[in-house]
Amino acid sequence: MTITLKHSQHSENAKAVNPDVTPVADALTDVLTDTYRLVLKTHACHWNVVGPIFYPIHQMTEEHYTDMFAAADVLAERIRALGKRASVNPVRMIDGLDPDADLAADEMVRGLLSDHETLSQRLYALVETAEISGDPVTADIATERAAFHDKAAWMLRATAA
Ligand SMILES: [Fe+2]
């Protein structure tokens, strides 16, 4: 009897603090999909870049896709911790990716830069959504991911200059 009462109180408290996790989980799912998409795109640049800046781009892209692949797992596990199913949207994941595109190195860099900027903006919005939902854990994860994408964007911008 006492245990049931405690459990019930705990559930009510949790609900009061975080009434609906759906907006946060949905935003995390969007970020997860975009992260995988950028892993694929970054890998393609890593393999196919040619020209005088081949080596720095080859090295930088490896650092970026390694970080993002690990981050995808963190994002997916946060979705699970919120009680939602972790998945990526396969259609959106390949949206705009052209396997036959034969891009020059500077075009590749500008394409990656644009995607990092977009993901960063999405993550800033997620920080806000998470804070509104009383979810500091997701807000922290999103803040950390935004910092990564801002730094990646800076490196790519400096490379393209
Ligand atoms: Fe490699």
Image: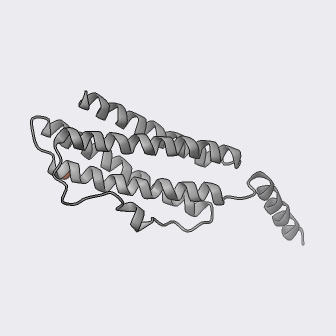
- Residue 19 as seen in the image, left or right of residue 21: right
Based on the displayed image, in which of its 4 quarters is residue 83 positioned? Answer: bottom right
Residue 3 vs 139, above or below: the answer is: below
x and y, in percent, of residue 40 in the image: 30, 56
Instruction: Choose between 145 and 94: the one closer to the eye.
Output: 94
Quarter of the figure that contains the C terminus: top left
x and y, in percent, of residue 69 in the image: 36, 54
x and y, in percent, of residue 23 in the image: 64, 56
Q: Which residue: 55% across, 57% down?
A: 78
Residue 71 vs 55, above or below: the answer is: below
Which residue is the extreme one toward the bottom? Answer: 1
Q: Which residue: 15% across, 52% down?
A: 102
Q: Which residue: 31% across, 44% down?
A: 112
Instruction: Choose between 112 and 61: the one closer to the eye.
Output: 112
Coloring scheme used: one colour
Instruction: Choose between 64 and 12: the one closer to the eye.
Output: 64
- Residue 116 as seen in the image, left or right of residue 81: left
Q: How many marks?
A: 0
Based on the displayed image, in which of its 4 quarters is residue 53 positioned? Answer: top left
Based on the displayed image, in which of its 4 quarters is residue 84 positioned? Answer: bottom right
Quarter of the figure that contains the N terminus: bottom right
Residue 143 vs 27, above or below: the answer is: above
x and y, in percent, of residue 119 in the image: 44, 45
Q: Which residue: 54% across, 55% down?
A: 28
- Residue 108 as seen in the image, left or right of residue 2: left
